[in-house]
């Protein structure tokens, strides 16, 4: 049979898509370099690993692999509802919070509708927008962060969805309570605003808002969070949205019936109860962040102050520095695709991992005087 041009046959928005580029897996670099002892600081994973309680609960769930998961995610929704002080009908579970972001686009963005988000914002926003034939409206950032007034000015009668990452990945920038509240009050109720709080549990800023508190005031608000970051369950893929029950109802209609698997559900419930693991992870992150900032300042490197568990630092020719770090067995994240070709994003690791990264970074910058910013 004749092969035709299947790219041309794809829906127009999908033809133009750039696939998401994940952090390089450790095993891949091991194969390429034939070395071990590789450090990955590329995907904002928890360097302490998963909650030990979650791991224990998982072992107990292995006998039930032949059963379909609970499609209604009853135990997880009950635990989340109790913790967040919302009804179970406000919660949408996803195969990672990325899944919830995609459900939102599928549910609320008809072809040609506009989706507003910031320059340098999380790469999944343009992906899910284009995949459904929506029109991305990218608003220039201010000081690397979201310019909420400009985003407000970008709303039109065609706007259906707004994505706000708070804090944003890869910049780590965040919007304070008053600014966000002003923005939410200015958005018409028929425009759904997604407040992506993937790093919520890491933030230690008095002016940082808890989006869930606003759900009563703003029925068009959807807050998304994840078990991939502080809870250390990235491999299992589980996240959730919290919204007005009608929005949750809509998302439930487009969701795959078993979008979150049994192991993920079990581990998430156990992780949610492990306050000690969350506290330890946040504490480690704060110390590691100070360690990295101090070293960057001492080296005269500019960085973007971050409220998350990662930080983007300006290194000059970032592609070359990235390659030099790889050869030293350290995986970080180039973010040229986010419009930041002079920066690298590094996840805060264990103290010894941060030390090794900083030493390798200094060596890479010294070896290549031209790369110095
Ligand atoms: C990591 C991340 C997510 C969530 O990823 P999942 O693993 O799919 O839950 C969502 N938004 C931002 C900004 C992130 O950095």
Image (spheres, rainbow, N blue to C red):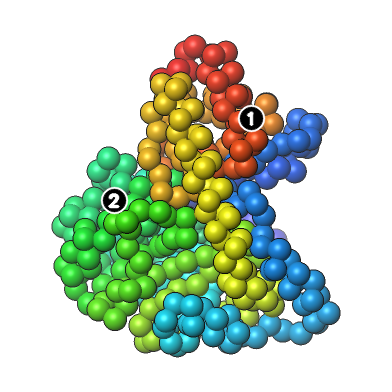
Q: Residue at x 64, y 30 (%)?
A: 356
Q: Which residue is mark 1?
A: 356
Find numbered disc 1 in the image and state the secondary structure of the residue it sits on. Answer: helix
Q: Secondary structure at mark 2?
A: loop
Residue occupying the point 30% across, 46% down: 145
**Vertically, is 177 above or below 325?**
below
Quadrant location of the C terminus in the rendered image: top left
Q: Residue at x 37, y 57 (%)?
A: 166
Sequence-first tag of 1 and 2: 2
- Res 96 seen here: no
The x and y percentages for residue 177 are 26, 61
Where's residue 228, x and y in %? Answer: 57, 60
Which numbered mark, 1 or 2, is in the foreground of this view?
1
* Residue 244, position as x, y percentages in the image: 35, 83
Q: Which residue is mark 2?
A: 146
362 or 169: nearer the eye? 362
Is the C-beta separation of discs 1 and 2 under 8 Å? no
Residue 271 showing in the rendered view: yes
Q: CA distance from mark 1 to mark 2?
A: 32 Å
**Location of residue 144 in the rendering, given as x and y in whole percent from the top left corner:** 32, 42
Ligand 1 has an atom within 8 Å of the beta carbon of the residue at disc 1: no
Badge 2 residue CB within 8 Å of ligand 1 = no
Q: Quadrant of residue 223?
A: bottom left
Does 63 sit above or below residue 56? below
**For this rendering, which residue is in front, 274 or 200?**
274
Image quarter in which the N terminus is found: bottom right
Quarter occupied by residue 60: bottom right
> Quick one: label 1, few (<14), some, or many (20+) residues within 10 Å?
some
């Amino acid at each position: 049979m004749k092969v035709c041009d299947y790219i041309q046959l794809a829906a127009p928005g999908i033809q133009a898509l750039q696939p998401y580029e994940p952090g390089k897996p450790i095993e891949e670099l091991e194969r390429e370099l034939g070395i071990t002892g590789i450090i990955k600081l590329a995907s904002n994973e928890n360097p302490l690993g998963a909650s030990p309680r979650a791991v224990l609960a998982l072992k107990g769930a292995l006998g039930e692999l032949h059963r379909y998961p609970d499609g209604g995610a009853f135990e997880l929704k009950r635990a989340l509802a109790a913790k967040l002080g919302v009804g179970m009908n406000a919660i949408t579970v996803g195969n990672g919070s990325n899944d919830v972001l995609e459900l939102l686009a599928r549910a609320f963005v008809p072809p040609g509708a506009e989706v507003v988000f910031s320059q340098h914002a999380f790469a999944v926003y343009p992906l899910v927008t284009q995949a459904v034939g929506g029109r991305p409206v990218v608003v220039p950032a201010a000081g690397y962060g979201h310019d909420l007034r400009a985003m407000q000015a970008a709303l039109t009668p065609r706007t259906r969805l707004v994505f706000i990452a708070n804090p944003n990945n890869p910049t780590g920038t965040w919007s304070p309570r008053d600014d966000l509240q002003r923005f939410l009050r200015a958005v018409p109720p028929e425009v759904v605003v997604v407040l992506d709080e993937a790093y919520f549990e890491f933030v230690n800023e008095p002016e940082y808002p808890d989006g869930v508190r606003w759900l009563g005031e703003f029925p068009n608000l959807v807050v998304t969070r994840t078990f991939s970051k502080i809870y250390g369950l990235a491999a299992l893929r589980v996240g959730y949205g919290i919204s007005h029950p009608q929005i949750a109802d809509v998302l439930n209609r487009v969701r795959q019936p078993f979008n979150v698997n049994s192991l993920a559900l079990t581990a998430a419930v156990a992780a949610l109860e492990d306050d000690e693991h969350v506290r330890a992870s946040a504490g480690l992150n704060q110390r590691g962040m100070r360690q990295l900032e101090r070293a960057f300042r001492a080296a005269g490197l500019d960085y973007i102050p971050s409220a998350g568990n990662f930080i983007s630092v300006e290194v000059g020719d970032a592609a070359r520095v990235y390659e030099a770090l790889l050869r030293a067995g350290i995986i970080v994240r180039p973010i040229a695709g986010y419009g930041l070709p002079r920066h690298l994003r590094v996840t805060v690791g264990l103290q010894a991992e941060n030390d090794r990264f900083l030493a390798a970074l200094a060596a890479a910058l010294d070896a290549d005087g031209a790369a110095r910013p």
